């Protein structure tokens, strides 16, 4: 049994053991799940179809000794060795084609994490999150290690007219609808995924504490994230720094690891096919939006 006393004053011991997280995708996210177990999370349902390959130890939190094992099985053993009180349910398969009982296990969790890098799977997951009325967080990295992105679909945000992951990444949906195709594989190095995992880990802890009404765990982080649930943190100082781009007011070399929330940028008349939000119906932001930022999405 783990002694959690070094988390005193930071993590509420009554919050984490009662929370359950579904992790869909166990590639770059691999280290996130054992770290949630270190914080005392009660239950993890992990879904991935893939096995550990010889290329994985270079970019994901797997060892050469785990080659050939299903990733979710390797993770279950890693977690059992860290915190045996964390209940892990490993599910091997593609999330869209799971048996009904496994599908229920995934979507019955307190929070679902969409950690795949496949746009079509993420789009499917967002439709499910909206239809099943569950909260889901999507996280990924940009090509060439330029930046990381975290987007959320939150029922509170939808109820307030702010929308879902599809609303906040409308331009991406439009690009795919216009025939854009993802490259078959994108190289990345581990610190890109670890930066994303660390930011996401803070948001997960915050969200669980916010929901539980605890003052610990920095609940303000999640409260603000839900206001505009699209966060981009750039790694390459030159990323989107040109005059007409998203970080144009934060020029190259001016700030490092700039992290920013972005408001939605939807065309007039847009109605989200997934969550039903329409821009005209949106309520105000609690956080003052910079008019300059409104131009970008
Ligand atoms: Zn939406």
Image: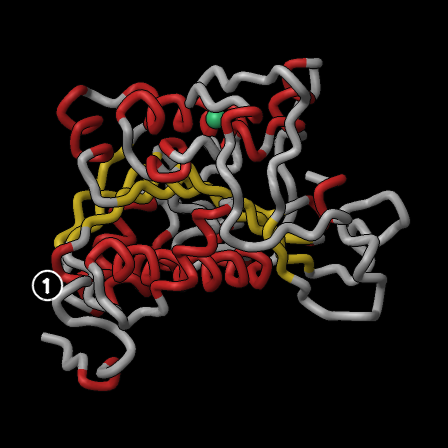
Tell me, yes or no, if residue 109 can be seen here.
yes
Percent x, y of residue 65? 36, 59
Q: Is mark 1 within 8 Å of ligand 1?
A: no
Residue at image position (49%, 49%) is 54
Q: Is residue 178 left or right of residue 286?
A: right
| Closer to us: 15 or 36 | 15
Image quadrant holding the C terminus, namely top right
Report the side of 279 relative to 4 (left or right): right
On the image, numbered disc 1 is attached to which residue?
Answer: 85
Q: On the picture, is 172 further left or further right than 87?
A: right
- Check the picture and name the quadrant holding the N terminus: bottom left
Instruction: State which quadrant residue 200 falls in.
Output: bottom left
Residue 30, by quadrant, is: bottom left
**Would you identify the image quadrant in which residue 276 lies?**
top left
- Residue 62 visible? The answer is no
Residue at horizontal 22 percent and vertical 83 percent from the top? 8
In this rendering, the answer to whether 273 lies above or below 234 is above
Seen from the viewer's position, the closer of residues 189 and 297 is: 297
């Amino acid at each position: 049994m783990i002694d959690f006393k070094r988390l005193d004053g930071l993590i509420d011991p009554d919050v984490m053991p009662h929370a359950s997280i579904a992790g869909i995708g166990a590639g770059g996210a691999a280290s996130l799940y054992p770290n949630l177990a270190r914080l005392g999370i009660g239950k993890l349902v992990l879904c991935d179809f893939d096995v550990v390959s010889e290329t994985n130890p270079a970019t994901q939190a797997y060892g050469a000794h785990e080659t050939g094992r299903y990733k979710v099985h390797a993770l279950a053993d890693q977690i059992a060795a860290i915190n045996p009180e964390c209940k892990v349910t490993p599910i091997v398969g593609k999330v869209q084609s799971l048996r009904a009982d496994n599908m229920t296990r995934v979507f019955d969790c307190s929070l679902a994490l969409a950690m795949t890098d496949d746009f079509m799977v993420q789009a499917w997951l967002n439709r499910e999150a909206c239809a099943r009325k569950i909260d889901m967080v999507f996280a990924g990295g940009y090509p060439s290690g330029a930046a990381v992105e975290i987007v959320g679909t939150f029922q509170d945000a939808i109820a307030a007219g702010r929308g879902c992951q599809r609303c906040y990444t409308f331009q991406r949906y439009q690009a795919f609808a216009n025939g854009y195709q993802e490259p078959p594989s994108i190289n990345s190095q581990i610190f890109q995924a670890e930066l994303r995992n660390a930011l996401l880990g803070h948001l997960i802890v915050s969200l669980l504490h916010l929901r539980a009404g605890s003052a610990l765990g920095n609940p303000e982080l999640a409260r603000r994230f839900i206001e505009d649930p699209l966060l981009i943190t750039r790694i390459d100082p030159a990323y989107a720094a040109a005059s007409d781009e998203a970080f144009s007011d934060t020029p190259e070399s001016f700030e490092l690891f700039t992290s920013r929330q972005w408001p939605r940028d939807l065309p007039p008349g847009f109605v989200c096919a997934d969550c039903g939000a329409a821009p005209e119906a949106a309520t105000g932001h609690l956080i003052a939006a910079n008019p300059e930022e409104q131009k970008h999405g």
